[in-house]
Amino acid sequence: MRLIILLIAALPLAIIQYSDETLASELGISESIGSYTSGCIRNSATLSIDGDGYQVIRLGRGRYYGNPETITYIESLSKKVKKELNGTLLIADISQQTGGPILDDHSSHQIGLDADILLWQHPIARNRTLTITEREHIHPQSVLTFDEMRIDEFKWSPIHGEIIKLAASDTRVDRIFINPVIKRRLCSVYPGELWLGKTRPWYGHDGHFHVRLRCPEENSLCESQKPIEISGDGCGSDLNSWFRPDGSINRKRKSVPSTQKRLPKECKPIMYPLGEY
């Protein structure tokens, strides 16, 4: 009898000793771990390839997984774009199923809180569901002129600015990366609007915009990015520093890290469940 009592008394301690990592795994809780450029996703959520106001492209890349917050954000934004603008979003890369490095063309997109959304409003996608083959051959179409110094007025439409405005106005958004030339156009159309402060100039991003969400509060292992250090709409000296006197992009403004950071230790069993690391 005494042995039974001791065993019962030990049960709460045994439960308490389960780590948050073990409990999250057992309960199927989704979690972003690490930073945007060095991390992974535990129990990622899947974005359906078709939804109300959106279609996922280039399915063969397998990058339609993310934090549940990202999935609900895309679904919510797409519904607004469809209802308010009669548009359809083409969703490109979010993250791989377990997150982690994407070696070919991204340094971020590792914890399921980044999403690439095309600016192009595909005329067919607005009227019917695209085939798998059609989706595989869709790529971002630049809205800039050939010299990349100005907006191409034949490719740009007011709906592009309105889509970015809707995307940035959501409180879950930390920042949105867009080409400096596009940012300059937005500044001229929406002067002084505070959501513009979330739109950050960056190289490329001339045919799509890159949404980055904040770390969800309950994701204790998610590392937030350093806050944006500008106030207001970001249309002043910060934006101007991206341009040379001739109007071209200042390619040497910032250096881009070329080395992959070490992944958090919690990512190894997630990305390599068989111990192959």
Image: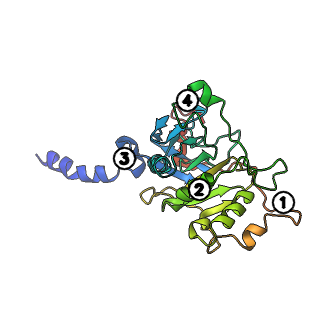
Q: CA distance from mark 4 to mark 3?
A: 40 Å
Which mark is nearer the camera, 1 or 4?
A: 4
Few, some or many residues within 10 Å of mark 4 (<14, 14–19, 20+): some
Mark 3 vs 1, N-terminal side: 3
- Label 1 or label 4, whichever comes before in sequence order: 4
Q: Separation of disc 2 and disc 4 at Cα?
A: 23 Å
Secondary element under disc 4, as helix, strand or loop, is loop
Residue 37 in view: no
Q: Which residue is mark 3?
A: 23
Asked if residue 175 is positioned above or below residue 8 in the image, the reply reads below
| Residue shown at 62% from the left, 54% from the top | 158
Q: Please name the amino acid that badge 4 sits on.
A: Leu
Is residue 267 shown to the viewer in this render? yes
Q: Quadrant of the C terminus?
A: top right
Q: Amino acid at mark 1?
A: Lys
Q: In which quadrant of the rendered image does the N terminus lie?
A: top left
What's the mark number on residue 130?
4
| Image position of 74 (left or right of 244) | left
User: Which quadrant would residue 120 be assigned to in this image?
Assistant: top right
If you read the primary sequence from the N terminus, does the residue marked by circle 3 or circle 2 appear first? 3
- Residues marked 3 and 2 touching at CB (< 8 Å): no
**Closest to the observer: 137 or 124?**
124
**Is the residue under label 4 in contact with that under label 2 (CB below 8 Å)?**
no
Tell whether 210 sits left or right of 25: right
Q: Whole-percent x and y of residue 49?
A: 50, 34
4 or 3: mark nearer the eye: 4
* Residue designated by label 1: 252
For image coordinates 78% across by 61% down, the residue present is: 254
Which residue corresponds to the image point at 63% horizontal and 61% vertical from the top-left? 199
- Distance of label 1 from label 4 (alpha carbons): 40 Å
The x, y position of residue 90, in whole percent, is 57, 40
